[in-house]
């Protein structure tokens, strides 16, 4: 179509060949293929000039419209690479979404007025490609080779309880003493087992199978139960920062805090070319790192590696 349009505009096969850096034979073949495909003559050829037939005139109008639409599409794709715009589908874990992302949304939206966010808050692990998610925040090691994972922060497993509970039941001084306390365990949805509690024991790791008085399948519910004095929990420090800041919980056995899973921003490889994905990733990583500094300040623990 581009070859035909250039011949029509220049009125010359050789002129079109020079303009397109093609041989004259190639230009003639391309136009002849169009005419053969549609079964009509598009150009009248003489030894001195080339003129459009009536069918060729109408077809040239269609070609120009197609070229304009293609240019618009290319401009939009280029714009998407350079300027954050359009709809961004985001999937985040429940605790991160509620406590960090939602409060920060006004700042993000003000910074990028051409973006529209479609946020899914869930602890379910989704298939980003199958469910057409542009970017997600995930804890743990990412092994999918089709995804780009940008590590934001590390985490620690901490053991904590409400001051009221400790006043009534006493402060454990070692992991083994926890077994004499009311423990609140976590069991992932769909799992039959309560998560083991882990502790740093010098250069090694100590693991205990807690005999839990209460078992819950929600990290949020776990924190809430502890805040209300139901017992002792082990959780990720990033999740417990707010009740720790408000002194609704206190850290127990801080010297035994074990390294937890990293938190990463992940997206399909194609997403790295989109400005909307890049800016959300940068914003989220900065948000998580600011939060981690708050966590370190309130727990007294160094930022995990």
Image (cartoon, rainbow, N blue to C red):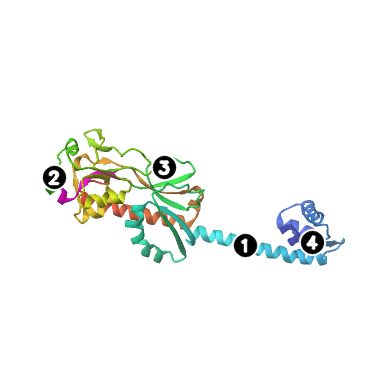
Mark 1 vs mark 3, foreground winner is 3
- Write down the region rendered in magenta: 155-165
Is 195 magenta? The answer is no
Structural distance between the alpha carbons of marks 1 and 3: 38 Å
Where does label 2 land, which residue? 169
Residue behind mark 4? 12
Q: Which-is-in-front pick, marks 4 and 1?
A: 1
Between marks 4 and 2 in the image, the one whose residue lies nearer the viewer: 2
Q: Could you tell me residue 9's position as x and y percent?
A: 75, 65
Task: Indicate the secondary structure of the residue bearing disc 3.
Answer: loop
Whole-percent x, y for residue 181 in the image? 18, 41
What residue occupies the far front of the structure in this picture?
213
Q: Position of residue 267 (x, y in %)?
A: 46, 49
The residue labelled by disc 3 is 142
**In the rendered image, which residue does mark 1 sit on?**
71
Q: Earlier in the sequence, mark 3 or mark 2?
A: 3
Identify the mark nearer the N-term, 4 or 1. Answer: 4
Which of 62/140 is in front? 140
Assign a secondary structure to mark 2.
helix
Q: Residue placed at 39% from the left, 62% from the top? A: 108
Indicate whether 17 appears above or below 259.
below
């Amino acid at each position: 179509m581009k070859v035909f349009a250039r011949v029509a505009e220049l009125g010359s096969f050789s002129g079109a060949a020079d303009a397109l850096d093609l041989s004259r034979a190639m230009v003639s073949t391309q136009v002849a293929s169009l005419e053969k495909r549609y079964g009509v003559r598009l150009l009248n050829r003489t030894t001195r000039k080339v003129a459009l037939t009536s069918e060729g005139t109408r077809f040239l109008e269609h070609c120009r419209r197609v070229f304009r639409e293609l240019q618009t599409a290319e401009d939009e794709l280029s714009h998407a690479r350079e300027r954050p715009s359009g709809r961004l589908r985001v999937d985040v874990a429940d605790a991160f979404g509620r406590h960090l992302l939602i409060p920060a949304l006004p700042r993000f939206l003000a910074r990028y007025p051409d973006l529209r966010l479609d946020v899914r808050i869930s602890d379910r692990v989704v298939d980003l490609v199958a469910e057409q998610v542009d970017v997600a925040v995930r804890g743990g090691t990412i092994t999918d080779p089709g995804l780009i994972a940008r590590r934001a922060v590390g985490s620690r497993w901490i053991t904590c309880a409400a001051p009221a509970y400790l006043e009534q039941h006493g402060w454990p001084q070692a992991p083994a003493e926890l077994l004499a306390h009311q423990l609140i365990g976590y069991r992932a949805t769909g799992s039959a087992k309560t998560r083991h509690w882990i502790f740093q024991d010098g250069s090694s790791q100590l693991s205990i199978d807690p005999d839990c008085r209460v078992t819950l399948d929600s990290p949020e519910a776990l924190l809430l139960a502890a805040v209300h004095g139901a017992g002792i929990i082990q959780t990720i420090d990033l999740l417990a920062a707010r009740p720790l800041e408000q002194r609704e919980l206190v850290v127990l056995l801080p010297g035994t805090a074990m390294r937890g899973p990293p938190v990463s921003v992940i997206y399909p490889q194609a997403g790295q070319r989109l400005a909307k994905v890049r800016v959300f990733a940068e914003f989220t990583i900065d948000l998580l790192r600011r939060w981690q500094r708050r966590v370190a300040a309130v727990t007294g623990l160094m930022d995990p590696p």
